[in-house]
Amino acid sequence: MAIVQLRIDDELKLQAVSVYEKLGIDLSSAIRMFLKRSVMVNGIPFSMILDEKAYDPEAAAKAMKNMNDSAKKSGASNMTLEEINAEISAYRKEKRRGK
């Protein structure tokens, strides 16, 4: 069994948990369902169609450059997986202390 870690916005998590609770499942089960369905359909298990009018490739490229620049400034662009996991662990420990 593998552990998967991801960072998401707190509000998004709360909203998703609320939806899944109404369906009688927890967040972990919902994520497992998404992954299993992805394997079954050999792709993303829902439509991913871009509205050509809404998609702005220049804005997307600018956003990617901004994120890359931000990662370089913060030193995150060269982090190894071990360093990322250590940072996540340290954050979680600090969060538990604050409770």
Image (cartoon, helix red, strand yellow):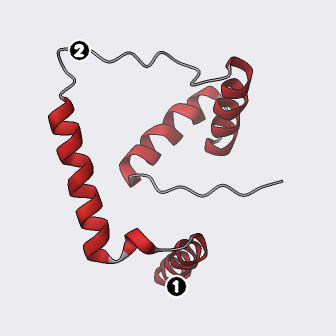
In depth, the one of 10 and 98 nearer the eye is 10
Residue 97 badge: 1
Badge 1: few (under 14), some or many (20 or more) residues near its Cα, within 10 Å? few
From the image, tell me which residue sits under label 2: 52
The amino acid type of the residue labelled 2 equals Glu
Q: Is residue 85 left or right of residue 33?
A: left
Q: State which mark lies toward you, 1 or 2.
A: 2
Q: How many marks?
A: 2
In depth, the one of 46 and 20 nearer the eye is 46
* Residue 39, x across and y down, in percent: 72, 27
Q: CA distance from mark 1 to mark 2?
A: 48 Å
Badge 2: few (under 14), some or many (20 or more) residues near its Cα, within 10 Å? few
* Residue 38, x across and y down, in percent: 66, 27
Residue occupying the point 47% across, 15% down: 47
Which residue is the extreme one toward the right?
A: 1
* Residue 44, x across and y down, in percent: 57, 25
Compared with residue 92, is residue 57 higher up or lower down, i.e. above or below? Answer: above
Compared with residue 85, is residue 15 higher up or lower down, i.e. above or below? Answer: above
Q: Earlier in the sequence, mark 1 or mark 2?
A: 2
SS for dot 1: helix
Residue occupying the point 19% across, 20% down: 54
Q: Quadrant of residue 96?
A: bottom right
Compared with residue 6, is residue 82 higher up or lower down, i.e. above or below? Answer: below
In depth, the one of 46 and 95 nearer the eye is 46
Residue occupying the point 58% across, 72% down: 85
In depth, the one of 7 and 17 nearer the eye is 7
Asked whether the beta carbons under mark 1 and mark 2 sit within 8 Å of each other, the answer is no
The amino acid type of the residue labelled 1 equals Arg
SS for dot 2: loop
* Residue 51, x across and y down, in percent: 26, 15
Residue 46 badge: none
Residue occupying the point 53% across, 82% down: 90
